[in-house]
Image (cartoon, helix red, strand yellow):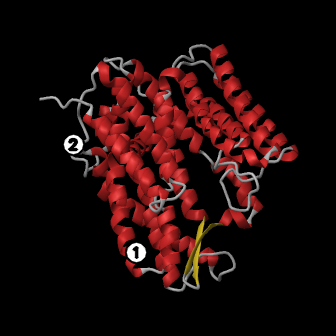
Amino acid sequence: MPATTFPSVAEVARATPADRDRALDVIRIVSLLGVVTGHTLMATSIITDQVFHWDNLLTTSAVLQALTWIFQIMPLFFFAGVASSVTSYHNNSAGDWGAWLLKRCTRLYRPVFSYLAFWAVALMVLHRVAPVHVYEPIAGISTQLLWFLGAYVLVLASVPLLARITTTARLAGAVAVGYGLIAVVDAARVNDPSLSWLGYANLSVWLLPGMFGVAYRRGLLRPSTAAALGVMMLAVNLALLRFGPYELSLVGIESQRLKNMTPPSLLLAGHAIMMCAFAIAAAPAISRWATRPRVWWLTVIGNSGAMTLYLWHMPALLGLHLAFDYLGLPRYPGQPHLLALSIVQLALMVALVAALFIALRPLENNPLPYWDGGTVTAARGTAVGTLLCLAGAATLASVSWGLKGPGLLCVAVLLTALATARSLARTPD
C-alpha cells in the first residue's frame, strides 16, 4: 500500500502477527507524542528590540517543574527501542554488527536528510530577511531535536553488549555499575566545578533504559517486582532532591545550577530506571488496552511516521511562534491573554503537525535512492558499524551549536560518515 495512504482498521488487524508485543508500540508512540505535546505547551517566545527570546514556561512555575517527573518520558523511547532491537539482532541472519546497525540506521536517518535540506534552505532565506538576533537563535535551535537520534544510534550500537543481560543477576549488576558510575561523575563535578566537563560521560544514562528493554523482552522482571523497584527509585530520587544538589525540573532550563538533562544527572538516571520499571509493571494492562481495534490502528499509524512527528513538529512550532510574535501576539509570561493564546496555538499545532505527518510520512517510509539497500560483507562490518557510531556522535555534538559555527562541521562529519558507511555496503545487482 502506498505510504501516502492509511490502511483500514481491519487491514491493520490482519497484518498484525499474533505474537506482536503491542505494549512496546504503545509505549513508543505515547512517549513521542508526550515530547511533542510538552514542547508545544511549554515553549514561549517574544521579540523585543529585534531579539528573539525562546524560553520555557518551566522557568516560571515550580508546579510545572514537578510535572516533569511524570512527563519526562523520553527514557521510554529508548526502553521500547532496545526491547524491539534485541530480538532483531538475534534474528540477524548474517550475524554481523555493522550490517545490522546499518539496517536500523537506514530507517532512522532516511527522513533526516530532507529535514536538514529544509533547514539549509530556510536558514538561507531567514539570514537575508530577519535581524541577526532572530536568525541566530533559530539557527541554534534547528538541530536541537537531533540529540535523541545521536544518542539512540549509540545505544543501538551497544545492543550486542546489552544483549548479554540474560539473567536477573546480570541485570542488577549492569544497572548498579551504570548508576554507580553516574553517581561518581556527579560527585566529582559537584565538588570540583573545574571538572564540569566530566558530566558528558553521563550520556551513558541512556544505556539504562536499554538494559530494562532487554530485561523486559526476556522476562527477567515480574510486574510486581518492577513496580516495587519503581517505587524504590522514586523514593531515592525524592531523597536526592531533598538532600542533594539537584534541581526539581527534569527538563533543562537556564536557571538550573546543576542541569538534570544536559548533561544527564544522577536524578535523571534514577528517573529512567523508575519509568522503565513502571512500564514493565504496566505492560500487561497496556497490551490488553492495545487489543482494541481503534487503539491499535492509531498506534500502528502513529509509529509508521514516528520520526516524522518528532522532527517536523519543531519547524512548525518555531514558525507558529514567529508568526504570532510578528503579529504582536507573543506567548510569553507577563503578556496578556496567555491562556487564550496557549489554547489557540495548541489547536493550530495539532492541525499543522497532522498536515505535516500526512504530507511527509512518505519520506520516512519510501526507500531513498542511493541510501536504502546494500549488503555489508563480514570483512567490512566493523568499519561500517564504527562509521555509524561516528555519525551518531556527530549528530549528538551538533545540537550544541545548531546549523552554525562548529555545528556545521558536525553535520558535515555526520553526512560524510553516513555516506562512507553506505559506500562500503555492496549494492546487489
Q: Residue at x 78, y 39 (%)?
A: 188
Q: Is residue 134 above or below residue 35?
A: below
Closer-to-camera residue (35/372): 372
* Three-letter code for the amino acid on which mark 2 is drawn: Tyr
x, y percentage for residue 284? 56, 29
x, y percentage for residue 310? 45, 52
- The secondary element bearing badge 2 is classed as loop
Q: Is residue 236 left or right of residue 150?
A: right
Q: Residue at x 39, y 35 (%)?
A: 387
**Which residue in the structure is indicated by mark 2?**
370
* Three-letter code for the amino acid on which mark 1 is drawn: Leu
Q: Residue at x 36, y 17 (%)?
A: 95
Identify the disc placed on residue 126: 1
Q: Residue at x 40, y 47 (%)?
A: 413
Which residue, as the protein is rendered here, is positioned at the far front? 194
x, y percentage for residue 156? 47, 32
Q: CA distance from mark 1 to mark 2?
A: 30 Å
Instruction: Indicate the quadrant containing the N terminus: top left, top right, bottom left or bottom right.
Output: top left
Residue 304 visible to an observer of this rendering: no
Closer-to-camera residue (298/116): 116
Closer-to-camera residue (386/183): 386
x, y percentage for residue 32? 50, 48
Mark positioned earlier in the residue sequence (1 or 2) = 1
Classify residue 226 by image quadrant.
Answer: top right
